[in-house]
Image: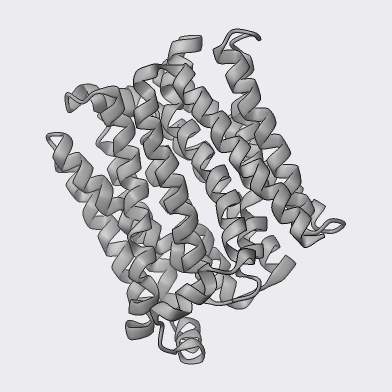
Amino acid sequence: MQVLACSATMVAQLGVTLYLPATPDIVESLYMSESQGYTSMLMYLGGAVVPLVFAARIVAAFGRAIVLLGFCCTLFGGSLLCIWASDSTDFYISRLLQGVGGGGAALIARALLSEIYSGIALAKSLSLLSYAFVFSLIVGQVAGGYLVSVFHWKILSLIVIVGSIVIMCLLLPVRERLSLLDARGRRRVCASSYAHIIVQRSFYLPVIVGGCSYGLFVIYQGMGVYVFDLMLGWSSSEYGLFGVGLGIAYFFGALSVRLALRWMGTYSVTLLGVSVMALAVLLFLLAILEYVGRHVVVMSYFAIWYAQAVMYPCVASMAVKKSAGIESMMLFSFSQQFVALLFGALATVAIPFGMHGVAWLAIGLGSCGAVVAIRLSIKRS
């Protein structure tokens, strides 16, 4: 089951990292602006939010295996359409469908783990997904940068198609186990149950912290190729190679979680991640304002990737602790991605103001996450 979960997570993230180094080529090929290129990533992330609205209902109606297969087919179809895209509208629609398919598959995978584990065990289990995430960060960004420098950017969609087929193949051996989960967890999912979960402070405070962290991660990812081109003069392939360092930073973050949870609670580890996140956005602002060397922005990126790896399994575990099950995990994923998508959309407004606008937005996000995390820790105490 964990192999299936890791594979779905990896393929879903490849839908982002593969295309990041190719953004300038896509913008030029489809006659788009830089902000439209960034918006195409938000279309993928927005598509990933869509399944969170109805997934629990269709899982209850059709079962986990059928729903997961449906999301894989959507990812497959969206990737085919991406190959045929000839303008920005076609590309937006294809990226939206890819997001629905990839995000839905990863969502089911995370929900499966939340039904099997809980508490610190769930945090450790979710940290395993970080290793798949690391693989997609390194291989996706490096491969995307290399492939787009040798071939046409549309070859990236073929890789996503292969990934969707791999998930379908991994699904076959675990169908019986998924059927057992269907039989054990089948019950009516209603709006009132979601309302009961979301008003709990123990749920929505971790969601805000996780949303701010993931929002920063999204902004840094989407703006990265432009930031390093403007500040350091890097090409797409050079930024692709930078993915190796980012992946290593994320790996150490995931490793830190597993080690720290032996001696510390999830609240303490979350504060550690928030501290690193706050340092990262401060370094980014200082580099933009030229109070420190421009190469410091590299350290800022490493710190954000490390902080995201540390914080995600902890805030997810805290949010679903009192309402374990597929509903709470899906609601957490929806809420966190919605918050992140909202702040990611704000970055499109900040782009016309240059890197200074993006830097101040990052400071605002980091400050919000830090304040809520401290309040959450005080409440816990």
The answer to whether any part of residue 48 appears in the image is yes
Q: Position of residue 42 (x, y in %)?
A: 34, 41
Q: How is the image coloured?
A: one colour
Q: Quadrant of the C terminus?
A: bottom right
Q: Quadrant of residue 16 in the image?
A: top left
Q: Quick check: 271 above or below 116?
A: above
Q: Nearer the viewer, residue 35 or 172?
A: 35
Tell me: 196 left or right of 291. left
Q: Quick check: 131 above or below 221?
A: below
Tell me: 186 left or right of 138. left
* Residue found 26% across the figure and 56% down from its top: 76
Q: Nearer the viewer, residue 193 or 290?
A: 193
Q: Position of residue 14 (x, y in %)?
A: 42, 45
* Residue found 30% across the figure and 27% down from its top: 35
Q: Position of residue 171 (x, y in %)?
A: 42, 71
Q: Position of residue 313 (x, y in %)?
A: 64, 56
Q: Nearer the viewer, residue 188 or 148?
A: 188
Q: Quadrant of residue 286 in the image?
A: top right
Q: Quick check: 178 above or below 90?
A: below
Tell me: 309 left or right of 331. right
Q: Quadrant of the N terminus?
A: bottom right
